[in-house]
Amino acid sequence: MISMNGEFIAFFLLSVMAIAGAVFMINFTRVVHMILALAFTFLGIAGIFVTLNAEFLAVVQVLIYTGAVSILMLFGIMLTRHRDETRDGGRPWHAFLCFLGVGGFFALLMRIIYGSPFNGETAKTETFSVSGLGESVFKQYVIPFEVTSILLLVALVGAIILAKKERS
Amino acid sequence: MPVSSYLALGAILFCVGLYGVLTKRNAVMVLFSIELMLNAANINLVAFSKYGLYANQTGQVFTLFTITVAAAEAAVGIAILFALYRNRSTAEADRFQSLKG
């Protein structure tokens, strides 16, 4: 039985925040409202990271998702002409079938999650630290780190070339 | 907290994102729903960095890499969307029916 301690209350509030933002994102009709709702979800996920003793990741999540990606998507909305309201009518069967399929997938996932015998052990979270994270990134995972920097460079150049106006 | 709660939260967010990808017409919202699915996967990685048999901080390293790749994906996705928008002058995903420029 789950005891009502502070961790449980924090997890409950943050997960409600994350799920509510996601569901509002699906249900809102105005595009800007959708993006604000999803930024709210990303904030909730950053809080979840804090409850999992991943403070550095929480800060990165706020900086990259709530800050950068949301603003990037807002630019995407502003720079493309869109009807302010998304049109969703006209194909009710499509949404219904998608709902059935996703619901079935969700039921399968829940069955697997709650049917699996997870080990109850917890890591020694007092050993978790930003310096430990940095050491494993720059020592054990230095090759993936460098490859990631190349990937970011390629994405930067590729995005500029793709979005640049073509001379005809 | 049992690890199943975090996995269940990840599953819920993933399914909401999947539903958004399948039903949204605006291509920007499809991209954004994909970001939500990636975040749901990150929750699983971080949860298993705290709970489990040999849990350690490696899960957080994986999540850092995932966040980086997701940011690159969002930037390239928006750029492709702009290129398509210039050719088709619409941002609705179901209007992009041909691969020809």
Image: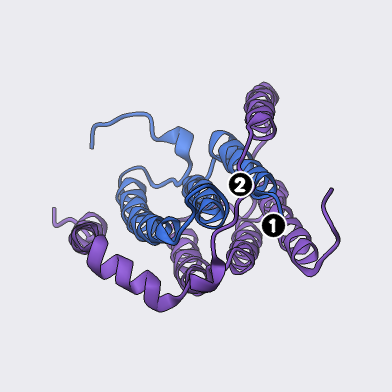
Chain colours: A purple, B blue
Q: Are marks 1 and 2 on the same chain?
A: no
10 Å neighbourhood of mark 2: few (<14), some, or many (≥20)?
many
Q: Residue at x 58, y 42 (%)?
A: B14
In this view, A9 is above or below B29: below
Viewer-nearest of discs 1 and 2: 2
- Tell me the tag on residue A155: none
B34 over A75 or under it: above or below: above
Q: Is residue A156 visible?
A: no
Mark 2 = which residue?
B10
Q: Which residue shows up at 69% across the image and 57% down it? A: A21
- Of all residues, the one furthest to the left in this rendering is A168
Tell me: A121 left or right of B78. Answer: right
Left or right side of A71 for B7? right
- Nearer to me, A125 or A97: A125
Q: Please state the horizontal and vertical placement of residue A109, each as a whole percent of the image.
A: 63, 31
Task: Give the secondary structure at mark 1.
Answer: helix
In the drawing, does residue A132 fall left or right of residue B36? left
Q: Single out the residue that lies furthest toward the bottom.
A: A131
Give residue A114's position: percent from left, percent from top: 69, 34
Return the mark for residue A21. Answer: 1
**Place of residue B28 in the rendered image (x, y in percent of width and height, measured from the top left):** 48, 51
Closer to the camera, B75 or B50?
A: B50
Q: Say what amino acid the circle numbered 1 marks.
A: Gly
Residue depicted at x 63% and y 29%: A112
Q: Is residue A111 left or right of residue A77?
A: right
Q: Amino acid at mark 2?
A: Gly
Q: Residues within 10 Å of mark 1 (few under 14, many from 20)?
A: many
With respect to residue B48, does A11 lie above or below?
A: below
Whether residues under marks 1 and 2 lie with C-beta atoms below 8 angstroms apart, the answer is no
Chain letter, disc 2 residue: B
